[in-house]
Image (cartoon, rainbow, N blue to C red):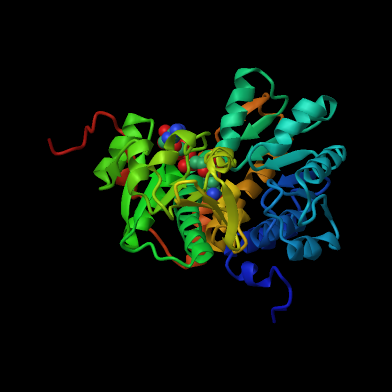
Amino acid sequence: MTDDTDPLAWTRDYTPILRSLAAEYGETQPLAGYSVALASHLEQKTGVLVETLRDAGATVLVTGSEPHSTKAAVVDALRDQDGIETFVEAGMSDEEWAAGQHELLEREPDFILDDGCELIVKVHADHPEIAETVLGGGEQTTAGITRLEAMEADDMLSFPVYGVNDTPMKHYFDNVHGTGESSLSNVMITTNTMLSGKTVVVAGYGYCGRGIARKARGMGAQTIVTEVDPRKALEAHMDGHRLAQMAEAAREADYVITSTGNRDVVRGDHLDALPDGVILANAGHFDVEIVVADIEAAADRVTEPRDGVTRYHLPDGRRINVLADGRLVNLTGPHSNGHPAEVMDTTFAMMFEAARDMLASEGKDLTPGLYAMPDRLDRAVANRKLETLDVEIDDLTEHQREYYEDWEHADSAF
Ligand code: NAI
């Protein structure tokens, strides 16, 4: 019988892949003797990943990947468990949160599972002697991969890192469906407004932006996409969205949602175009996509009409509403629950597999650098997910396999 007072109980029901990994590797203990540092938004799904790593034998050192997304009940649920140490509390200032991460790194983790490259950057920049002892890492976000690519270009990395974000099992589902659904649901809950019939401007048509735009349109909104990459722009066009530059799109916006992984996407230059009552939200990793300081500088009054909404009153009477202070709307607002559990089940299964696979050889198979995760791990997690859905798919027949391998197509009828 489940104990429904346990804050992780509900989430465990919706994370069957993690439960199946815990059951299998709880027996074989592949992570026994290793300490695994984990930086992630510390809410219920992360709590289940922490337990799964611990069940497979690891000592898990836990911190948040963002100071404002930590849930007190989850820290409380983890803190007293064997094999788990927490270095974060809800309500910490940015400075306290960073200090907790340094304290964690001083425990000399064997492996780092990261989000936004928080710990991997800090260990290299501030604890280089500890970085030398880390066996490997895994990174779950686009923003973190961008930082890792920059570190690799500067020849900075001292251990191998799997780019978990770039696996199909992560970004096809987490970025598109997880960010799409959770960002829109948070915008609607925070504002108590309806998307149907409104104009939603989505900045960035990568994996996240595509999910946000498609799902907004599915709910009856008109969508305008802004992009800087001509191919992504054309993809948005072919998917049926309108294209415009931000300076133009902003004029028609009821909502602007940014998801570019870039900075200054909505900035002072766009203020003149924004209509009265517009709602601005960010789904990108860092709070630099909407330049809130520019809006604040232009305002003569700031109010908080609802929890999670800051309203800037411009001298000409227009009101600009910014959600969650321009931080990740689906993770840091007052109503935020992050991604749906089912999608984090897939992402976190990939993170678990990154640690298990690389620690099996203690990272010795790989020289320092950023690596694609082996396809066999991606397929294995996909198959595990299908098993939890009780769905079977076809296998290639022998002839089909031969056909793929025969470049001459010698047996074909032509
Ligand atoms: P992506 O690289 O697939 O897409 C980003 C898109 O933004 C690209 O097509 C790029 O051309 C475009 N872009 C860049 N600068 C732009 C600008 N100034 N104006 C318009 N478009 C611009 O990245 P992905 O996976 O969609 O991630 C986007 C951001 O969302 C990252 O910061 C990532 O870390 C974050 N993220 C957030 C999640 C959440 O829970 N809110 C979950 C997953 C990722």
User: Residue 267 location in percent, x, y?
Assistant: 49, 36
Is 367 placed above or below 232 here? above
Image quadrant in which the C terminus is located: top left
Question: What's the residue at 39%, 49% (across, down)?
Answer: 275
Question: What's the residue at 75%, 58% (across, down)?
Answer: 55
**In the displayed image of the protein, which residue is found farthest to the top?**
154
- On screen, residue 79 versus residue 387, left or right, reads right
* Camera-nearest residue between 192 and 157: 192
* Camera-nearest residue between 192 and 359: 192
Q: Looking at the rendering, which quadrant does residue 160 occupy?
A: top right
Q: What count of labels does the image hold? A: 0
User: Residue 340 location in percent, x, y?
Assistant: 54, 61
Is 227 placed above or below 318 here? above
- On screen, residue 131 versus residue 232, left or right, reads right
User: Residue 62 location in percent, x, y?
Assistant: 77, 50
Could you tell me if residue 96 is visible in this image?
Answer: yes
Could you tell me if residue 403 is visible in this image?
Answer: no
Image quadrant in which the N terminus is located: bottom right
**In the displayed image of the protein, which residue is found farthest to the left?**
414
* Camera-nearest residue between 146 and 60: 146
User: Residue 335 location in percent, x, y?
Assistant: 59, 64
Is 29 placed above or below 130 here? below
* Camera-nearest residue between 328 and 352: 328
Question: What's the residue at 71%, 31% (across, down)?
Answer: 121
- On screen, residue 404 versus residue 391, left or right, reads left
